[in-house]
Image (spheres, rainbow, N blue to C red):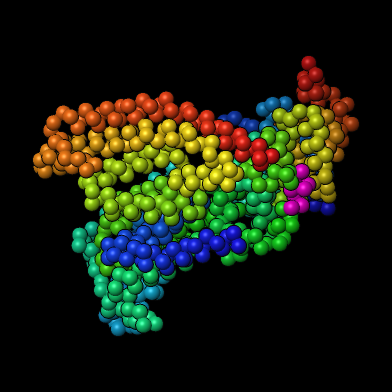
Amino acid sequence: MRTIAPWLALAFAFAAAPMIFSSGSALTTMSLMGVMIVFALSYNMLLGQTGLLSFGHAVYYGLGGFVAIHAMNAVINAKLGVPAIVIPLVGGLAGLGFGFLFGLVSTRRAGIVFSMISLGLGELVSSSSFILRSFFGGEEGVTTNRAKLAHFLGFRFVSQIEVYYLIAFWCFVCALAMYALTRTPFGRMCNAVRDNPERVEFIGYSPRMLRLIAFSFSAFFAGAAGGLAAIDFEIMNAQQLGAQQSSLVLLMAYVGGIGAFAGPIIGAIVITFLQISLSDVTSAWQLYFGLLFIGVVTWAPGGIAGLLALHRQALRQGEAWRLAPAYAMAAPALAACVVGAIMLIELGNRELALERSEGSAMRLFGFSVDSASLAPWVVAIFLLGVGLASMRRLWPGVESAWGTVNARLLEKAA
Amino acid sequence: MTAALQLVDLRKSFGATPIIRGVSLEIAAGERHAIIGPNGAGKSTLFHLVSGRIRPSAGEVRLHGERINDLRPFEIARRGLSRSFQITNIFPRLTVYENLRCATLWSLGHKYAFWKPIDRLRDARERTEWLMDSIGLGARRSLQAGVLSYAEQRALEIGVTIAGGADVIMLDEPTSGMNNSETEQAVALIRKVTEGKTLVVVEHDMSVVFKLADRISVLVYGEIIASDTPDRIRENAAVREAYLGQASH
């Protein structure tokens, strides 16, 4: 029951989300979130579960997407009655095939060797996308028209709401399958090979075989995500399999938390949301992503899921109230840091970088300011400075509150 | 009868430096065999050669009469030879229970199965429960192995080693770093869990060796200078000079 409840909740959330967020742009965003959830979960099969840090995971997402889009065009041209709902499987099988092939080369070793080979393969595939134009479609990419695909039980998957439900369906199925995989002999041995590949050999397992199977599965689900993207966007281009997409999925998995199964789901939702909403607000959005990533790596290596798990444990044991005073003290200081930093970045962006041509009048947190005048800079530096100084003083209080909570939790456990 | 484990003129050099210089040894099935020797004698290297972690430069290792020199460690493990490590070598982020269960899987035939829910495998569960009782870590089952105390990790190390039901068990200094009462418990544990199996053990603690072993081989500078019953080894002049005498200074 305890394992079924979250899945029922997830299914319900998928089903109900369009009723709450029904606007066209919300549907587009949620569709993209569904695609990214599958992609990020597939990435974490490698990073969180098998201990393989890949810098080229978008290769399988992209190749899955390209094969899916060619498959769509082929069945449309040949008038085969193939509906859109099976296309993600085509993407998945393409991912599986390429994953197995490239996995043979890259899974012999873990650690730095694996990471470097994944980076090399990523560069190899994305540079060949400009050479093999008939397959990758050059700069424009390859397009399709999902409206021409066959019907399926009366659904044509033309409107965004139908596409959303198609993605939600596959996202749920893939997430469930990936979770089930973690609870098999193979899944547990992936954790073992992550922890200690040497010892794995002495209990009868080939670390390389474990990595290869994990890599192939992971590429299958990445390819399925690519297939979903092909249906959603109706276009695939070389960017989808490039280094930027590979680092995006790493960012999602890590920010969400690689130590928990749900981490990448959270990461995919948060990062996709930020990506879409932040890029409307500021042209420096990638800088914020970078800062967010550095912040998580430095202060919350367990990601959002890790932070949630910590607090949930404290809440359940009725110890969370001990944190409240320290948090209440630190919150204004943290807010001052964040606001000061954002002001500095935005002022800098306007005065020195991308948006220089826009002139110096701008809006910041609802105020009209002139980035060429001294005042906003002084305020920004003041806020950041005071915020940082107060955080230095107040952080030990947060730490000692956590110390007390942890000690109490240990007492209760014993 | 073929020996459980047979070494034939086994040699290993690292570069120009010979570490194992022609070791021949036969260990009968069911025998408890200890290998002793001063530091740097090559005891751990010998273990690595037998278990496939490193390959011999020359000579042969036979397990139940079959040559295993060229096999990978996991292939040797699948043939029923299992070893522990001098420096604890477990899965630190897995729970105690999961450490043991993972170590049972191959021998129970579950291999790389990705279609079977692991919690429904009755044989793995029963064997894991039995192991956990045997090594006395029942109360620690849900803890991450990395947070166990040193002695507990050593016990888990033995548990992981015997989990697959191997009939040849090799333990590399199983009691190193333990205090007296922990050592005593470890010896009792080793006795219990290796009942009816072939045991090869490297050990520094002479009291452990004399309590545990049916036969003792003395390894000095990569050569076996004596291989006999504990009583005779105690009386052997060469051994006293090379090793035991040295230890009593």
- Please name the residue shown 28% across and 42% down the image: A287
Q: Is residue A38 left or right of residue A159?
A: right
- Please name the residue shown 27% across and 56% down the image: A239
**Which quadrant would the N terminus of chain A be assigned to in this image?**
bottom right
Using the image as rendered, state which of residue A258 and residue B43 is in the foreground.
A258
Q: Position of residue B103 (x, y in %)?
A: 66, 51
Magenta stretch: includes residue B30: no
Q: Position of residue A298 (x, y in %)?
A: 42, 36
| Residue B12 in sight | no
- Please identify the residue farthest to the top as the structure is shown: B249
- Please name the residue shown 34% across and 54% down the image: A272
Q: Quadrant of residue A64?
A: bottom left
Instruction: State whether residue A352 is above or below residue B160.
Output: above
**How many circles with numbers are drawn on the protein?**
0
Using the image as rendered, state which of residue A60 and residue B195 is in the foreground.
A60
Q: Is residue B122 left or right of residue A145?
A: right
- Please name the residue shown 27% across and 77% down the image: A147
Q: Position of residue A244 (x, y in %)?
A: 30, 50
Instruction: State whether residue A386 is above or below residue A56.
Output: above
Prevailing SS of the magenta stretch: helix
Numbered range of the magenta stretch: B129-136
Q: Quadrant of residue A338?
A: top left
**Which quadrant would the C terminus of chain A be assigned to in this image?**
top right
| Residue A339 in sight | yes
Q: Position of residue B159 (x, y in %)?
A: 72, 45
Q: Is residue A197 left or right of residue A215?
A: right
Q: Quadrant of residue A369?
A: top left
Using the image as rendered, state which of residue A373 and residue A107 is in the foreground.
A373
